[in-house]
Image (tube, rainbow, N blue to C red):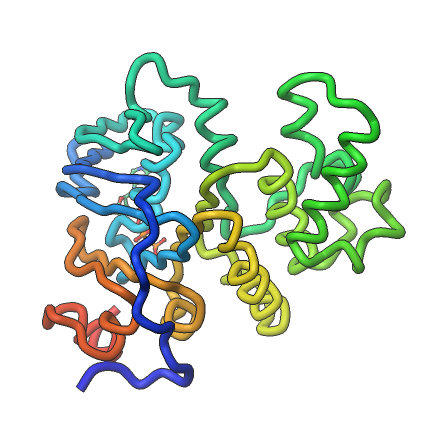
Amino acid sequence: MAMAIASAPQQTAVATPPIIDSHDVHLWYGTNEALKGINLTFHEHEITALIGPSGCGKSTYLRTLNRMNDLIPGVTIKGEVTLKGQDIYSSSMDTVALRKEVGMVFQQPNPFPFSIYDNVTYGLRLGGKPSREELDEAVETSLRQAAVWEDVKDKLHDSALALSGGQQQRVCIARVLAVKPDVILLDEPTSALDPISSSQIENMLVNLKKDYTIILVTHNMSQASRISDRTAFFLQGNLIEYDDTKTIFLNPHKKETEDYISGRFG
Ligand SMILES: Nc1ncnc2c1ncn2[C@@H]1O[C@H](COP(=O)(O)OP(=O)(O)OP(=O)(O)O)[C@@H](O)[C@H]1O
């Protein structure tokens, strides 16, 4: 019998339109093949969790979705990733624009050493010369969406570095939201946070999915089962199983998946 986790998994996902498609994605770091032909389709307005033991390629795969691996020397990528039907690896793709459409939040909160206001407006100011009113509006909307407005509204011009870790992470999420992405990638966004901050971020992500598509790497099985609609299980660079979260946690089809989620390895 599979898994023993505290919370009931999400209900069976009802398919929304696909937004990202990856087809036969391989990635090598030098000669080490870290991804061995990944086929995955992500659906709009869903949260998808990527799970699997350390070193199985989850973070590497997440970074292929907005070409963040391009920044790592010695990386070779083959295969196809499309965003709304457009090949993101085509030579005509503007990677700065891509990373606005497919934003990323990292494990460690990484606010810039600026004010909260300047952190949230950073991407907007890179893209042009928005008016003060536009910036003010974006700051309030994004901080509200990231569920941190009430904490910071009276100190927007204080350093973001003076906030708690959980508040910093929510400001980093607001920074991504301010440029209105379609997709948000999160790489273990709560693993450096206390349980209360983690739970605030989980609730926020569930609220955000009505407006965004969310793809989340997590080691936390309860988190995956609490908030995700679909779950993909990776092992040694392969995608072993991808299904709605309820099936993965209650009735996985592959033995490796069952062994992992029931804690037999990893
Ligand atoms: N920058 C890099 N240079 C060389 N090899 C790397 C690099 N990043 C990851 N790897 C290797 O690629 C493989 C997959 O790593 P990756 O970080 O994607 O796994 P992961 O499943 O996200 O692991 P974790 O859960 O520990 O974060 C591992 O063998 C790792 O050592």
Q: In this view, does 71 lie to the left or right of 175?
A: left
- For the point 67% across and 48% down, which residue is it? 171
Give the quadrant of residue 82: top left
The residue at 18%/31% (across/down) is 79
Residue 262 image point, x, y percent: 24, 79
Quadrant in which residue 130 is drawn: top right
> Is 212 in front, or is 252?
212
Give the answer, above or below, for where 182 lies relative to 96: below
Q: Nearer the viewer, residue 258 or 83?
A: 83
Residue 176 in the image: x percent, y percent? 58, 40
Compared with 35, 230 (above or below) is below
- The percent position of residue 58, horizontal first and vertical second, equals 30, 51
At x 85%, y 44%, the residue is 158
Q: Which residue is drawn at 29% across and 18% down?
A: 90
Q: Is residue 259 left or right of 165 when viewed as pictured? A: left
Image quadrant occupied by the N terminus: bottom left
Measured from the top left, where is residue 261 in percent x and y? 25, 74
